[in-house]
Amino acid sequence: LIRKESCPEAYGWRVVGPTNLSDPLQHVENIRGFKIRDDDVILAAYPKCGTHWVWEITHMLLRQTTDYEKRCKEQVMLESNGGIARCEKEESPRIINSHFVFAHLPQEIIAKKSKIIHVWRNPKDTLVSFYYHYKSVIVDSRFTFSDVLETLMADKFTTHTQFEYLQQMSKFEEDHPDHPIIHLCYEEMKKEPIKVIQELARFLKVPADDEFCRKVADACSFENMKVINQSGQKMFPAEFSVSRGPGHKNPVIYRKGVVGDWKNHFTVSENERYDDVINRAREKGLKFKFIY
Ligand code: A3P
């Protein structure tokens, strides 16, 4: 894992992005300066919270179709290698998809009051999902879940923590109370997908009757998404994979798609220690109430 101390800082945050960046700080500047269109929708999420799922749903709502053939096949992350150029070429309405903290996102989002869809998930399942993501991309992956957890608890995680991300999200809302943001909770989406899709459609101001929302929920179910995206190559073009350098593979995104898999991974004592981490984040202002 990349150590925190090896990541440069910009605007008070560690820079994370493609591992082969020659100038990470310039990369952040390029993203902060990225031109936003009036009808862009921003999809902001900490990694492994269900970004791909919400991307598919949003795409279907904006395009008013559940037909896979009509969808854009590539879910570009703005900060990925070549991401800016690919986003620039995309047809409107675009979904600008990023794991960057707000300080590193295109700053025009604020002036244009771009709609922001924020996806969040309980931090225990997120970490388990992160672990398997790493396992799937790194060829020499002898590390265990405990190794990843210990790295996080030693504050040496490869990126900002989910708690830092969420705190920054709350801070952004406090600073911009009129900004349109919808918070989609992974666990609520699992429980009542149609209801969440209806809420999202209202937020996006797109027509979506009950029948269409039901079709979107079905088309975007874990089982369907897994089959459709099985190869992984559909979402991640070759250069993305190459950009990760030798020893890296395409990630497995559609792994299990359930709530509570953390119970199969944390020991009792690890769980208690992680709860302490969460409680400390609460003392520092973390507001989100997680569903486990
Ligand atoms: P798991 O690893 O727990 O299975 P992201 O898209 O942000 O990388 O998040 C990936 C996580 O979302 C994975 O979690 C993946 O299985 C889950 N996911 C993706 N599509 C989903 C869907 N349609 N329904 C439920 N979970 C989904």
Image: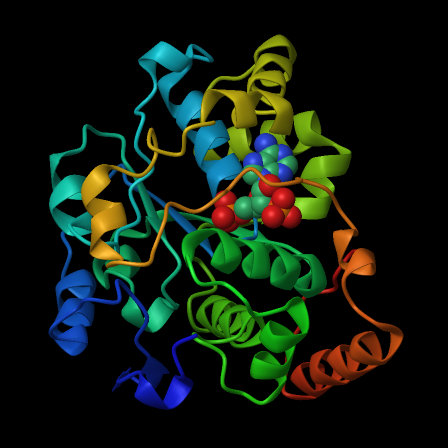
* Residue at 43% over, 73% down: 175
Residue 181 x, y percent position in the rendering = 48, 51
Front-most of residues 153 and 11: 153
Residue 4 x, y percent position in the rendering = 40, 85
Quick check: 200 above or below 22?
above
Q: Which of the 4 image quarters holds residue 96?
A: top left
Left or right position of 139 against 193: left
* Residue at 81% over, 57% down: 264
* Residue at 66% over, 40% down: 257
* Residue at 24% over, 60% down: 106
Left or right position of 172 against 224: left
Residue 224 x, y percent position in the rendering = 58, 20
Q: Which of the 4 image quarters holds residue 255?
A: top right
Q: Quadrant of ligand 1?
A: top right
Residue 254 x, y percent position in the rendering = 55, 37
Where does the N terminus fall, quadrant-wise? bottom left
Quick check: 72 above or below 39?
above
Q: Which of the 4 image quarters holds residue 278?
A: bottom right
